[in-house]
Image: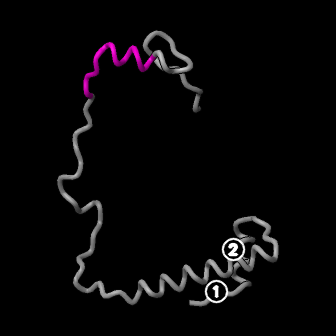
Amino acid sequence: MNISKDKIEHMAHLAKINLLPEEKEKFFKEFSQILDFIEKLQEADTSKIEPFASGEIAGVSREDSAIPKSDELIRKLINNVPEKEENLVKTKKIF
């Protein structure tokens, strides 16, 4: 696969980054190597490999349940946080 220097400039423009001439050359070489590698991967014989999708695998999920911890462990953990209130960890607001 070939990539032109114009396409490198176009991608930089889309990403809103300014590239120096030497950076353009560096990215051109790196993208060319990546695309060459992808081209080699396309040649691999995958005819005997069955398609795989994570949603099709059975038995990989588990029930979400709390595991009880000792009061001593909880006390040690709470003592190591920078801000706390009783047995709760204080965090920054996210909304």
- Queried whether the magenta region covers residue 59, the answer comes back as no
Which residue occupies 59% across, 32% down? Answer: 95
Is residue 26 shown above or below 88?
A: below
Bin the neighbour count of mark 1 within 10 Å (Cα to Cα): few under 14, some 14-19, many 20 and up.
Answer: few
Residue topped by disc 2: 11
Q: Image check: 85 left or right of 95?
A: left
How many marks on residues? 2
Magenta part, dominant SS: helix
Name the secondary structure under disc 1: loop
Q: Residue at x 25, y 32 (%)?
A: 65
- Which tag is nearer the camera, tag 2 or tag 1? 1
Q: Which mark is residue 3?
A: 1
Give the residues drawn in magenta, as a range. 67-78
Q: Helix, strand, or loop for circle 2?
A: helix
Q: Is residue 8 left or right of residue 52?
A: right
Q: Residue at x 25, y 22 (%)?
A: 68
